[in-house]
Amino acid sequence: MRVALHTRLKPGREAEYEQVHAVIPRDLEIALRDAGVTSWAIFRDGLDLFHVLEVEDYRAMRAALRDHPANIPWQERMSRLLDVEDDYSGNDDGLKLVWELS
């Protein structure tokens, strides 16, 4: 399934966010792939971040990553950069698709 997400950076954290994402820790990449992620792209417009990912089951992925030892330090790092921290407690399905050119 394809899922789109929107997150927002804290002001002044743009360069640090991009620097952190220049190299994703190998154990996190493995955890993402093990959780069913086949691709993940992030686009930035000012402070707004738009994520587009392909994953077998989005909710199952979030459940698998919630307490994963590779994801916990990553989310702690992201919480310093993002305007709203993701605590993995929600049952969201991402952004609603409004229109698509197939």
Image: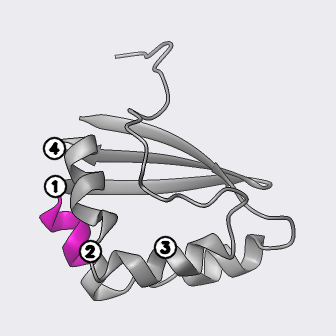
- Give the distance between the C-alpha atoms of the residues marked 4 and 2, in whole angstroms: 18 Å
Q: Is residue 9 left or right of residue 69?
A: right
Which amino acid type is marked by label 3? Answer: Gln
Looking at the rendered image, the quarter that the N terminus falls into is top left
Circle 4 is placed at which residue position?
56
Q: Characterize the local packing of mark 2: few (<14), some (14-19) or many (20 or more) Cα atoms within 10 angstroms.
A: some
Q: Is residue 12 magenta?
A: no
Circle 3 is placed at which residue position?
75
Q: Mark 1 or mark 3, which is nearer to you?
A: 3
Q: Quadrant of residue 34?
A: bottom left
- Give the distance between the C-alpha atoms of the residues marked 4 and 1, in whole angstroms: 5 Å
Which amino acid type is marked by label 1? Answer: Gly
Residue 73 lies, in percent from the top left, at: 44, 84
Q: Mark 1 or mark 2, which is nearer to you?
A: 2
Q: Nearer the N terminus, badge 1 or badge 2?
A: 1
Residue 50 lies, in percent from the top left, at: 58, 46
Residue 86 lies, in percent from the top left, at: 53, 58
Circle 1 is placed at which residue position?
36
Above or below, 97 against 77 in this view is above
Q: Residue at x 86, y 72 (%)?
A: 12
Which amino acid type is marked by label 2? Answer: His
Q: Mark 4 or mark 3, which is nearer to you?
A: 3
The answer to whether any part of residue 21 appears in the image is no
Circle 2 is placed at which residue position?
68
Check whether the beta carbons of the residues at disc 4 and disc 1 lie within 8 A of each other: yes
The span shown in magenta is 29-36
